[in-house]
Amino acid sequence: MSTSKTDGEFLSLTVTLGGRPYPLRVVPEDEEPIRRIAKELNDKLTDFQETYPGRDKQDCLSMLLLIYAVDLYKVKDGRAAIDPKIGRSLTQLESTLKAALEPKN
């Protein structure tokens, strides 16, 4: 992952997920959580690939996304007793995934 400063309020950050780089513009205080989340995602993706060797990377990414989406849904629905720090991390993860999945012009 690389970082460079831009216009004072945002950082340009490139996050690599599943071997593909995704450029992001983030506020400085989000840089560290995004890096931790990206590492966690890549680690879990590796675990999925090792657990399900017959599946391609897209299948493993889809399973990973589903697991996080269910966890986020439970938090938003109020069904999960969760530490506020974890809730912020899940919200940040959602933002990171949305930014990574947005079509590029």
Image: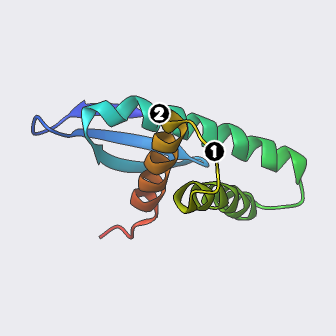
Does residue 21 appear in the picture of this structure?
no
- Residue drawn at x 89%, y 60% as measured from the top left: 54
Please indicate whether residue 23 sits to the left or right of residue 56 in the image: left
Q: Report the residue marked by disc 1.
A: 81
Image coordinates for residue 10, horizontal then vertical, percent? 20, 40
Q: Which mark is residue 10?
A: none
Q: Label 2 belongs to which residue?
A: 35
Distance from disc 2 to disc 1, alpha carbons, whole Å, reads 25 Å
Mark sitting earlier along the chain (2/1): 2
* Element under disc 1: loop
Residue 72, percent from left and from top = 57, 56
- Judge depth for marks 2 and 1 and give the one in front: 1
Asked whether, in this view, residue 21 is left or right of residue 105, the answer is: right
Q: Amino acid at mark 1?
A: Ala
Question: How is the rendered protein coloured?
Answer: rainbow
Nearest the viewer among 4 and 74 is: 74
User: Hey, which quadrant is residue 64 in on the image?
Assistant: bottom right
Q: Position of residue 38 (x, y in %)?
A: 53, 40
Front-most of residues 63 and 52? 63
User: Which residue is at 49% across, 41% downward?
Assistant: 89
Q: Residue at x 30, y 31 (%)?
A: 29
Can the viewer see residue 60 in this picture?
Answer: yes
